Amino acid sequence: MMTTETLASSAVTGSRIEAGPRGAKPKTLTIARVGVYVFLILAALFFLMPLWVMVVTSLKAMPEIQLRNIFQWPQQITFEPWLKAWDTACTGRDCNGLKPGFLNSVKITVVGTAISIVIAALNGYALSFWKYKGANVLFGLLVFGAFVPYQVVIYPLIIGMREIGLFGTFPGIIIIHTIFGMPILTLLFRNFFAALPPELFKAARVDGAGFWQIFFQIMVPMAVPITIVAVILQVTGIWNDFLFGTVFAGRENMPMTVQLNNIVNTTTGVREYNVHMAATILTAAVPLAVYFISGKWFVRGIAAGAVKG
Amino acid sequence: MAQLATAKEGGAVIKAASSSGRKPFRLSTLMSIVGTTPMIATAVGVFVICIIYSFVLSFTNSRIFPAFAAENFVGTDQYARLWSTGRWLISVNNIWFFGLLSIVANMTAGYLLAVFMDQRIKAEDWFRSIFLYPFAMSLVITGLVWRWILDPNYGIQATVRGWGFTEFAFAPLVNSSTAIYGLVVAGIWNGVGVTMAIMLAGLRGVDSEIWKAAKIDGIPAWRTYLFIVLPMMRGAILTAFILQCVGVVRVYDLIVAMTQGGPGISTQMPAVFVIQHITDRSNVGLGMAAATMMLLPVIVLLGVQAFAQWRANQVKEKA
């Protein structure tokens, strides 16, 4: 920093840092700028390549896949693999494709997201305005829980779920998603409510409103933006879950990710790579749609998720 | 808040029985406790009792079901066994190797991308979307796609050989000494966009005066990025780093989808080890010993962070 002062007078030395982001927008295309774009485009190609491979593979018939040109656009487009992946692909004994898994995932995601968000919003609200003795300790435990590897608590949860008869059931998997979504979602809502002007709460108290009244009439309407972030976080999180689905959902409620993995890893019969890739795209479709529709909100969700540190 | 509680609520006040000096217990407090029952149940039931339960089980010889009879307690036998089990030793080696390599590569690539994104480029939103979209997809999908791309018979290797380079070899997943690199590549593809987004936000948060000063000094942009701006982004770096650490310790889906721990047991990881032992291998005691070992680094990391925070507060108070 010292040199800054001393050298300030010795004038600008030239074009060396014209590519710096704070400078004036460069009008001419220097070699440096070309380099920037070349790098970014190469990086973009690396990120897009798997998507491209997935799509072209899923549109080829098996004989064309045997030609071993993974990047090439299909000479003859077929949607057969997509139909098969959705409708008749086999996972061991069952040959119903991905559609039962899709329906299960929709159910689990919708119910799981709704319940976990309601609970987390209540937690955040209570932690911001109605702290009781020990509330901070509970919150600390919850934040700690965000870092606990799932494997540490998964076996006791299996035993517990079995004891109350919910192991391998729909309510069981919902409870599991609610538990593991709670740390980060509670943090999200607590930070949001804590940042609201306290006068809002005090005025309602003076008017005689109680715990539930203030929550439903004042806080819920105000919490719409943070709820959107929470929904994005939970929908992608629950949809993409694999571990809890395998362990807790049971055969009847098997989510799409688990079914996808079963289809691809079924060892019997010929491996139909085109069907596998079609199934992969189908499973990725929902979170991808959420991502592209929500745009900036998605990034905000990640940033919010990241603050748990 | 106490002053604001009006007479209206007076009837609902349940006086603390013995000491008159204590705060009265109010209906609203009761409601707050009722409203947060799920949180109490989760915080205590899952993050305390379940952890203790797992810990206690690690001292038993439980097989499929938990066994708590006196004769089931075997002291630290499971830990001794764990640390002489080849599968576990490989898992521990792998997680360190995988973790270090992925975190270093992810942070480097993430910062590099962020710096290039920071060059007042056109179509920034497009690039951002492209770098970030893999993160929206699950690690199962990531694993399956990359397994296909790296397939020795049909993937990149076969394709490039088809172009005439018949000696070309690139199929890391089939070789037990290179399979882990395949996992690292897939993991980076999935997660580097997030690091980039966090780092970019950090870059944009740096005071623009710094840039002016550096420019006047004639310091080249790359040096400014590396030696001046980077050290100023401690918050962003720490956030990205912690996010990576949590992800690495939990890595399970990627392994299951991509290598299933193979070839052989060359890509075994602790998370996979635990699940295998509480399911197929039905050796809960050993599995719980492994789970306890997984918790250890987390506790150390959180402890260090808490200590650092305490120290920072201490310094602040003195000043």
Image: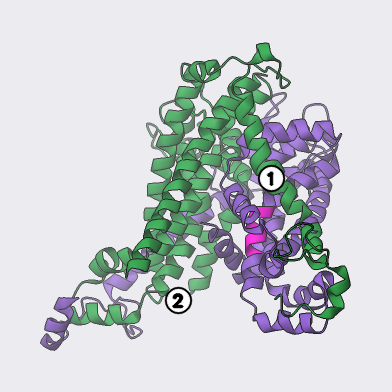
Chain colours: A purple, B green
Position in image of residue B178 (x %, y %): 41, 31
Residue at the spot of label 2: B122
Amino acid tagged 1:
Val
**In magenta segment, residue A184:** yes
Q: Mark 1 lies on which chain?
A: B
C-alpha distance separating marks 1 and 2: 51 Å
Numbered disc in front, either 1 or 2: 1
Q: Name the residue under label 1.
A: B44
Residue A24 in the image: x percent, y percent?
33, 86
Question: For the stretch drawn in magenta, what is the main secondary structure?
Answer: helix
In this view of the protein, can residue B260 be seen by the observer?
no
Q: In this view, does A303 lie to the left or right of B316?
A: right
Residue A5, picture quadrant: bottom left
Q: Which residue is drawn at 40% across and 35% down?
A: B97
Magenta region includes residue A65: no
The magenta stretch is A182-188
Q: What element carries label 1?
A: helix
